[in-house]
Image (cartoon, rainbow, N blue to C red):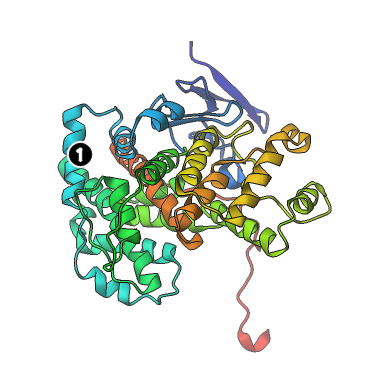
Amino acid sequence: MSRTAQIILDGKTYELPVVEGTEKELAIDISALRDLSGYVTLDTGYKNTGATQSAITFLDGEEGILRYRGYPIEQLAESSTFLEVAYLLIYGELPTADQFSKFEQDIRLHTLVHEDFHKILSGFPAKAHPMGVMASIICSLTAFYPEAIYERSKEYIDLTIIRLLAKAPTIAAWTYKHSIGHPVNYPNNKHNYCSNFMSMMFALPVDDYQVNPVVARALDKLLILHADHEQNCSTSTVRIVGSSKASLYSSVSAGINALWGPLHGGANQEVIEMLEAIKADGGNVDKYIAKAKDKNDSFRLMGFGHRVYKNFDPRAKIIKKAADDVLTSLGINDPVLDIAKRLEEVALSDPYFVERKLYPNVDFYSGIIYRALGIPTDMFTVMFTLGRLPGWIAQWKEMNERKEPIGRPRQIYTGATERNYVPMAQR
């Protein structure tokens, strides 16, 4: 027997169906409420509203669980690769050897971008934020492939997906090179996905650049951990823009702009900026721990706790080891990273932080790794973008395959009631 919920409005009872997900999540389906009663619900920020049903990612913040298509993030980070995880998210199942070989080869064939991108890049100031450049250039792919707006065959959508996954690292690396006035590096398809990106980022015409395999694997793992995270701000943006039948490129560009916001994708950058500020103030960690505990002090430790995970962030457990491996492999002596390690020790042992579950999160450790790799702080959110790309693609694809209606939230109007126009001379 199906379950229902009752809501009583103006003395009349309305029965609304209860929806149960495969992980026993429960929701009241209010989609017919306005037609039945004239009422809408108010949920500022959509904190309690399920905007869609999705089979892609399961997240339980209370238990610290994250699964892609049912597979625990711990298993994927340990045993899989970023491109295999991308295939899983986008197509729903882990690929066979033949499927993955074709997927990987197709991506290799599309890593080049049109030479006209040199002209587009040259139009941006060197000091332009890389996220603004990235969003603009990804959006411009629709101009290069205008058929992406109306061509919705499976074959063409698959080609669009491949193009986006293949070209995004090239665009990101070229964006960085432009910002520092260096010549761009073309992709070298003898490398794997992450090694190719690192080579495009850091190779110079005067040197023979060698990709450190420990570094490439750490980056691969970071991208896996960021690949999807349920209906967050940027993912919801991709879905609602895509619901208008906008192209995948335009929808992902909108997601990039949402991710750019400091409340969403900028946390790992804020971690490094905080560590730099502590160093500039003498590096006294105890002083800043005391400030963090003082409820009258506005200082906040960045990279600790999570607004969704009420337990330890499962991704942080994985990336902590990768951070340790990278720092050991590179033999880095960086006072800013020394401050990070001391903060980590305190947060994992001090009762104040332990009782409040203010554990180091994935942003804390990813910021440490990116700094160790020599990636500048204003590129951190671009790295987040590269990781989140498969999730955005999967969400856009799922929404289109289900033929979901165009997104159109309601509101509760709180402005002036009807009034008559007053000529300017009488005001």
- Which residue corresponds to the image point at 39% horizontal and 52% vertical from the top-left? 241
Towards the viewer: 159 or 306? 306
Instruction: Examine the rendered structure and indicate whether residue 378 appears above or below residue 362.
Output: below
Horizontal relation, residue 27 to residue 240: left or right:
right
Q: Identify the residue under disc 1.
A: 103
- Which residue corresponds to the image point at 32% horizontal and 47% vertical from the top-left? 194
Towards the viewer: 65 or 220? 220
Towards the viewer: 59 or 27? 59
Q: Residue 205: horizontal and vertical position, in percent?
A: 26, 68
- Which residue corresponds to the image point at 68% horizontal and 84% vertical from the top-left? 427
Secondary structure, mark 1, is: helix
Horizontal relation, residue 100 to residue 132: left or right:
left
Q: Residue 354: horizontal and vertical position, in percent?
A: 72, 33
Residue farthest toward the bottom in the current orientation of the protein: 425
Instruction: Examine the rendered structure and indicate whether residue 114 appears above or below residue 345.
Output: below
Q: Residue 297: horizontal and vertical position, in percent?
A: 80, 55
- Which residue corresponds to the image point at 60% horizontal and 42% vertical from the top-left? 43
- Residue 254: quadrant of the picture: bottom left
Instruction: Examine the rendered structure and indicate whether residue 345 appears above or below residue 120.
Output: above
Decide if residue 258 is in sight here: no
Horizontal relation, residue 188 to residue 383: left or right:
left
Instruction: Examine the rendered structure and indicate whether residue 338 appears above or below residue 34.
Output: below
What residue type is disc 1 on? Phe
- Residue 207: quadrant of the picture: bottom left
- Residue 415: quadrant of the picture: bottom right
Q: Residue 105: horizontal and vertical position, in percent?
A: 17, 42
Badge 1 density bin: few <14, some 14–19, many ≥20, Cα 10 Å: some
Towards the viewer: 173 or 395? 173
Q: How many marks?
A: 1
Decide if residue 199 is in sight here: yes
